[in-house]
Amino acid sequence: GDSVTQMEGPVTLSEEAFLTINCTYTATGYPSLFWYVQYPGEGLQLLLKATKADDKGSNKGFEATYRKETTSFHLEKGSVQVSDSAVYFCALSKGGGSYIPTFGRGTSLIVHP
Amino acid sequence: GAVVSQHPSRVICKSGTSVKIECRSLDFQATTMFWYRQFPKQSLMLMATSNEGSKATYEQGVEKDKFLINHASLTLSTLTVTSAHPEDSSFYICSAPRQSGGNEQFFGPGTRLTVL
């Protein structure tokens, strides 16, 4: 079945450091790929998405590129802030009437001043 | 953008009581909604798919008599935790998919259930 694998956390960085959170997936067909962010005590929010190969999703300084050849969707940000501290979930979803998403286990990011 | 609300945001109850959690799509219709459970520092566990006008589809290992789901309308799904016990304490999150182009999920803010 479909699966999403994320690097284990927590990832601990100093403010203004470069961030990479790795995500790889296994799926049949052509899924859409997503990054969601969960701040403490809250639900998940969509951070960015890409719906086809070579698409780049971007939002709030975060970027991720849909790489079909490596089945990856790594999340990057050039300069993190303390306010970016949260849990980040990589996910995939396929259409065709099936909307059930598959989530990675989440990666906790801690940014220190 | 689309918004999903949940109510209540936090509930504390005694063991043996039942608790109802509501999930509403505020500005779009959702024929399908999902219910998740999240343990501390862990990922989301899909519990069930709520289908408007038909029975919910439960994931393996989830007791359907314990976690009653009713999708009463195109904007409302409810999850009732029956005869709650301390091990049911968790963070419950619902989501509804945008059923066009991309299938992104819109999540509710979550409900923290504590069973004493």
Image (cartoon, helix red, strand yellow):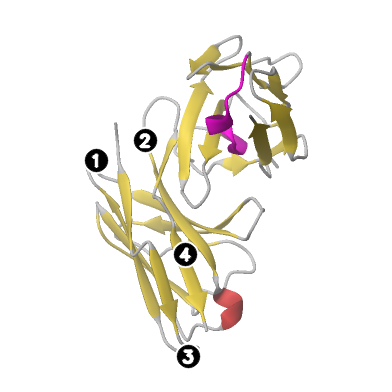
Label 4 Cα crowd, 10 Å radius (few <14 / some 14-19 / many 20+)? some
Tag 3 and tag 2 share a subunit? yes
Q: Position of residue B102 (x, y in %)?
A: 45, 27
**Chain letter belonging to callout 2:** B
What residue is pinned by disc 2? B98
Of residues A68 and B86, the one drawn nearer to the viewer in this rendering: B86
* Mark sitting on residue B28: 1
Q: Position of residue B49 (x, y in %)?
A: 46, 56
Q: Which span is picked out in magenta? A: A79-92
Ranked by sequence position, the earlier of labels 2 and 4 is: 2
Instruction: Report helix, strand or loop for mark 2.
Output: loop
What residue is pinned by disc 4? B112
Judged by depth in the image, the label closer to the viewer, 3 or 2, is: 3
Of residues A100 and A86, the one drawn nearer to the viewer in this rendering: A86
Amino acid under disc 3:
Gly
> Marks 2 and 1: in contact by CB < 8 Å?
yes
Residue B22, compared with residue A99, is above or below; it is below
Task: Name the quarter where the N terminus of chain A is drawn.
Answer: top right
Instruction: Report helix, strand or loop for mark 3.
Output: loop
* Mark sitting on residue B16: 3
**Chain letter belonging to callout 3:** B
